[in-house]
Image (spheres, grey):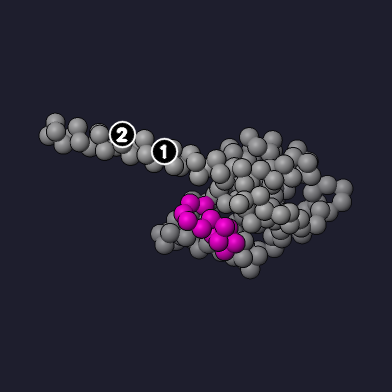
Amino acid sequence: LTAAASIAFALQFHMSLTTTPELLAVQQRALKECAPVFNWLKREVPASTPLYAWQDAVTFLYSGHQSIRPPAQDAFLKDSLGVGANSVEQSFKIWEKSAAASGSLLVLTTGDFLGDSPEQMLEGTKKTILENTRFEPVYETTQAVVFKLPEQTISAVAVPAVRPTSTSP
């Protein structure tokens, strides 16, 4: 038993040494790629505007805006994995209703998605949001999308969708 515990500990320790740096590298790359959206939020969106973001702490740190996770996020994630009762579309409707009540913008970035193709996952999520809600993009790159509802204004003048060039190689 002691040998098995030692082997399990050694494997766990080895895995943490090899996977943690890889995960950190992925997150650092995602932050670098998403810097333009955070800069845009700082420049163009009043500091009093709350944001819904899957990575709420990261969004707060880099944009300076109060950021919270969208409501029903757990139900959305479970359903997207094939577990749970709520549908993805229902989760997006809950986000829409809550954003209308709170005045929040919805921020999605490639850093929100794990796997080999976060850009494709972001694009697919954006498509589902556009098909099932009244959210519309006001800022968009291959690494990030910021959505607002039609009745929301970001500043004194509505901001058109922006498509800056990608910063990724």
Amino acid residing under circle 1? Thr
Residue sitting at 44 percent across and 38 percent down? 21
Q: Nearer the viewer, residue 43 or 131?
A: 43
Q: Is residue 112 above or below residue 13?
A: below
Locate residue 124, reporting x and y percent.
57, 64
Label 2: state its secondary structure.
helix
The magenta stretch spans which residues?
Answer: 113-124
Marks 2,1: beta carbons within 8 A = no
Residue sitting at 65 percent across and 65 percent down? 130
Q: Nearer the viewer, residue 63 or 78?
A: 63
Residue 78 visible (yes or no): yes
Residue that carries the numbered disc 1 in the rendered image: 20
Quadrant housing residue 96: bottom right
- Tell me the tag on residue 13: 2
Q: Residues within 10 Å of mark 2 (few under 14, many from 20)?
A: few
**Residue placed farthest to the front in the image?**
169
Residue sitting at 57 percent across and 46 percent down? 30
Q: Is residue 13 left or right of residue 116?
A: left
- Tell me the tag on residue 73: none
First in sequence: mark 2 vs mark 1: 2
Amino acid residing under circle 2? Phe
In which quadrant is the N terminus drawn? top left
Locate residue 75, reporting x and y percent.
48, 54
**Residue placed farthest to the left in the image?**
1
Q: Residues within 10 Å of mark 1 (few under 14, many from 20)?
A: few
Total labels drawn: 2
Quadrant housing residue 120: bottom right
Would you say residue 116 sits in the magenta stretch?
Answer: yes
